[in-house]
Amino acid sequence: MYFTKIILRAIALYAVIFIAILGCQSNAGQTTKFVDEAAVKAKLDSTKKAIKADFKSAKIDEIIKRKVNAENFNGNVLVAQKGVILYQKAFGLAQFQDSTVLTNDSKFQLASLSKTFTSIAVLKLVQEGKLSLTTTVDEVYPDFPYEGVTIHSLLCHRSGLPYYEYLMSDETRKRKWSPTNQEMMQWFAAQSPTPKAYNLPDHFFSYNNTNFAVLAAIVERISTLSFDVYLRREILVPIGMTNTYANTTKSDSININRTSGYERNRLVPRDYYDEITGDKGIYSTTSDLNKWYEALRDGTVVSKELLQEAFTPRSFEHPGLRNYGYGFRLWVDAKQRTDYVYHTGWWKGYNTIMFFDLREDFVIILLTNRLNRTVYHIKDIIDILHNGSKTATVEENILDA
């Protein structure tokens, strides 16, 4: 009995000591957490001061309010620099028919801005050795009727392929048919005679949605996944873009905070080509697009070496400041070196732009669901982000092709 009491007292003592140790460790962990949070806040405050965040935010607000009041802008805006969100607001309606108001979580059809996702999806497969830039389409689709069209030539719009939207329009309307990417590839293979190509591969730059619709089909064939599933699984969700979807997704989550497109306040009806993605068809938010910029900046999805390839000018037929890389529009200097990277979009009531400078680490995102090409007038914002000292070469209007 005596020894039993001693044993029980020893156990109780050890238990007290163990609990005390755990408590100390927990307190130490919380202290470390508080120290880390304080360090992060101090760094953020220092960055805000260095980039004159409050001044820039106020100036950007003046510009956007002018867009809303004088240019009838209806949409969402986000501007960030060096990890600081300088400006993020929503203006107007997501659904005009029931007066649903836009919020920062509203999802917009990105139109041709979607091409940036297609490009990175393809480059990821290149990085993994599943494709190469010299792979030809007919190596992946043996029945594809055009020879010598490489991944490279598709990515930089130098394939010479005809435009699927014009070629297939009579059949889609007659049959009330909404083809998928795979059905588009089958359609090209089945035509007799084969529709004439506009040019030989790699002879001339010609911006063409067919290129990126074909690339999305190749992603599906190589990955054995639908394009939307591949994007979500391999790219979007891993970098935290949980509010971004392809139009063809089976997830009902796309409909949460989803906008509709309008032209002069008239709802634009569904299009026969809505099921073809890669050239368009991604829905996203300004917050998710800011994450997209950060992933591109940091080389999170593909290596910085491959990103450099994507941001390298590849079209010199028309001398000037605008150029094209691999799925990204480029603003170049007089020596044809990339100054800025961007893409615009225009589809069924939507106008979009994402414009960024990797050296100054800023991104400008404007999304509208009511047709308004003044979305591309962002020179004043660029000037502010450069403190008014850099952008003499940037034109007032960045046109979408």
Image (cartoon, grey):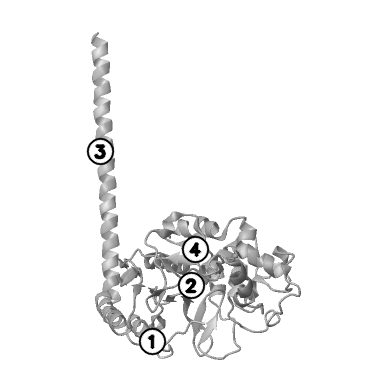
Secondary structure at badge 3 equals helix
The label number, if any, that marks residue 23 in the structure image: 3
Residue type of the residue flagged with mark 4:
Asn
Residue 358 on image: x %, y %: 44, 75
Query: Image check: 209 left or right of 85?
Result: right
As drawn, 334 above or below 100: below
**Which of disc 2 and disc 1 is earlier in sequence?**
2
Query: What residue is pinned by disc 2?
Result: 111
Q: Are marks 1 and 3 in contact (CB under 8 Å)?
A: no
**Which of disc 1 and disc 4 is earlier in sequence?**
4
CA gap between label 1 and label 3 equals 55 Å
Work out whether residue 218 can be spotted.
no
Secondary structure at badge 2 equals helix
Residue drawn at point x = 43 percent, y = 65 percent: 284
**Which of disc 2 and disc 4 is earlier in sequence?**
2
As drawn, 95 above or below 237: below
Q: Residues within 10 Å of mark 1 (few under 14, many from 20)?
A: few
Q: Quadrant of residue 66?
A: bottom left
Secondary structure at badge 4 equals loop
Residue type of the residue flagged with mark 1:
Lys
Q: Quadrant of the N terminus?
A: top left
Residue 298 on image: x %, y %: 46, 66
As drawn, 230 above or below 15: below
